[in-house]
Image (cartoon, rainbow, N blue to C red):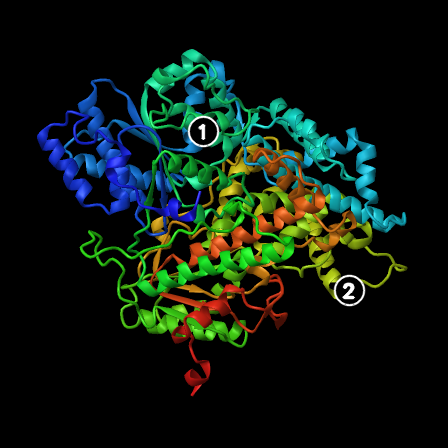
Amino acid sequence: MSDTNFTAALPPESLHPELSGLLPVSSLRAEAIARIRNSLRPGQQQMADWQSGPLAISAVPGAGKSTGMAAAAAIAIARQYERSSSRRQLVVVTFTRSAAANIKAKIRKFLRDDLSLPQTGFFVYTLHGLALNIANRHSDLSGLELENVILITPTQSHRLIRTAVEQWIVNNPDVYLRLLEGHQFDGEETERLRRQSVLRTEVLPELANTVIHEAKSSGISPELLREWSKQTTDEYAILSVAAGLYEQYQNLMRSRDFIDYDDMILAALRVLENDSARRIEQNQIFAVFEDEAQDSSPLQTQLLEILASNQEYQQENSPLLTPNSSLNTDVMNRVSWHSPLNLVRVGDPNQAINSTFTPADPIYFRQFCEECDRIERLATMDRAGRSTRIIIEAANFALKWINNQWLATTKTNNKQQIPDNRQVPFRLQTIRPVEVGDPQANANPAPVGRGLELYTPRDIHHTVELLSQRVIELFGEDPTKNSAAILVRENRQGRWLAEALTPLCKEHKITLYDVGERDRRSHVPQEILALLQFCDRPHSPDYLKAALEALVQRQLIPTQDLNALASLPEEFLYPGPLAAPQPETVQKAARLCRSLLRARLELPLYQLISFLALTLNYDQAELATADKLAERVNQQIAGNSSMGRMLSALSEIVSSERFEPVETEDSEERYTRRGQLTIITMHKAKGLDWDYVFLPFLHENLIPGRFWVPPQSQFLGDFTLSEVARAQIRATLHEESIIPDVSQAWEVAKNLKTSEEYRLLYVAMTRAKLLLWMSAAQKAPFTWSKPDNLQEQAPCPVFPALKRQFPECVVNLAAMSK
């Protein structure tokens, strides 16, 4: 399918040829529907005109997806009232709870104020909320008894993953030994211990975490993954190792009555395999609307397609997908003009920024768009009123330039052009300003200053000076008038900026809100647990390394090779007189660890958590969170106080994730308040917007970044096991003819990561309304764990291209200093 076809506007009448006379809508309600429809943009109107069948909506940033979906949902509900007296509901599915609350409020407003209808006839869920609802209603079929299970979010550091790794090592000593030997192993004991630490605490947990997410979210069992591994010939049998880790994890989950988010989806699909239960669920739903469809995983897509299938049309030759079936083939065969799929999917493939660390993959939404395009059921929302025109031009230029560079590089490397344009970072989907008379107030507003400002400071300190000057100018005499945000690639950048900008903001009465500080509060129980486990068993390499990682994260000790320290705990903590002198960085870490052990001996148990919170240099909110944690733990162990009981209680809190940090409010509005300068990561900024957006530190080593192998794991080769496994699994899911070998899979993984980083930059650029401020300093840290270690850094490749394309937006720093 051509990119032109992908973005071509679809005439409303082609969405349903009998639009004018199909449904008997009362004249008053028809007038109300017409008023709502006429208040929308063309792309939004196409969604509002939907009446049945599949429909794909590809929307650009700022096009008004949520408003369009809410209006279309309200109109669909109104038509359903006229169509039937049945109580079938519209199901609206979105990505986050805050987005669900937002769209629910908008639908209710349309029903109440415009259509004079009851605020019923629909449900709004997150995908996992929908799945859990179905599983809970049919617990006999789903196998989930919610009062008996604990929901967890497994991560690489989760103790369940670590336990699965340890059990796999015990059961597979020969394979583990092959990994331990890696390359160029001379048998030296210190190196063996170091490699052992790397494998047990980094490489294998990362492989397990990645593969569990990838395979489970696609309905792939450990057995099927093991079958796939027979098609590979790499020296480590990576997919076979991954299958073993996955199997151990599943066994542990079952034995402890744990479930994760993918289990919710699988449980709902088990329910829908039952004919009777499936009919019950389908008969309650007349259609499904999905927002942010580019972020769906294969199983999530499958769940929605089953629910959206009108069972009256279900054909015997169109069977439901089973978890191990070939992805989307059967469902896509049902996408036709008279398809039983009453499914509207809205998304933007160019804002897919989660696929390298979640199972989401924009390829599935692209496939749905292509199938809908084939039957003339693809509509676009390419008009956006959020940003001033120069910002739109800059975003469009960046998109096209990156794609062109990508294709040129691909031709050079492969000596031929790859015809499948799904492999380029972006779909050629141009953002267009709104038309005259658009209903949005102040659409495509006039720019502030140049609208786009491009800076090349001397270093990161000069960056802060320039950014501070601009912030003061923009907020002016009335700091409460406008909103602004600094978007960073890493939380460590945000922390450094917050410290640098705090005095300025206090002086000029500008509220500074570092979103990363709140996020860090949610890790308080994990950090406290790591230090207490070390205090309890200081000679455990795993516990020592976890404690050191927490101290490094809090910037209490310098970054260093923690595996070398953790492999010999006694030598690190209490070096003998014949031991080699420790470097100052190691001495500092050892002194802090010994002080923790002294506190364990000298303080009563109930004071330990508070002491550790002070040691970790927590801020006021984090201290409040630690106090709340201490009170809860002390209540649980009252009457039988011991270190073992305390660790058990803390482990339960961490694994069950049933602990909320102290927080005064829980709304995304706190990120965009007027009079506030928000520091937030680019990932978290998706879906938000501000009058002024600052993008500092745009360097090539972060965007698109260098896909590199950590030095400590280079003994395995010039690749990482987790990324190779991810690429191999996705190749199989995408029905490629063969599973790529290690080198091919590593290249695929690099391309996926680079594409996503560029899409992340595109998302960041399109958050700005009036001014987009971008900078790439000549000198910056190689790693932000050591921000004072400045060196020459190349800018993000698109930044010089923007300077050449928009020379009038390049700020002359020499002229500013005069």
In the displayed structure, 564 sits above or below 446; it is: above
> Residue 762 falls in which quadrant of the image?
bottom left
Going 65% across and 26% down the picture, which residue do you hit? 224
**Residue with the most extreme bottom position:** 818
- Mark 2: secondary structure: loop
User: Looking at the rendered structure, which numbered label has been put on residue 332?
Assistant: 1
* Residue 212 in picture, x, y percent from top left: 61, 34
**Viewer-closest of 523 and 802:** 802
**Viewer-closest of 483 and 586:** 483
Question: Would you call the spot at circle 2 few (<14 residues within 10 Å), some (14-19), or many (20 or more)?
Answer: few
**Disc 2 to disc 1: CB gap under 8 Å:** no
Q: Using the rendered image of the protein, determine whether residue 160 is visible from the camera's viewpoint.
A: yes
**Viewer-closest of 169 and 219:** 219
> What residue did someone put label 2 on?
583
Residue type highlighted by circle 1: Met
In the displayed structure, 253 sits above or below 650; it is: above
Residue type highlighted by circle 2: Pro
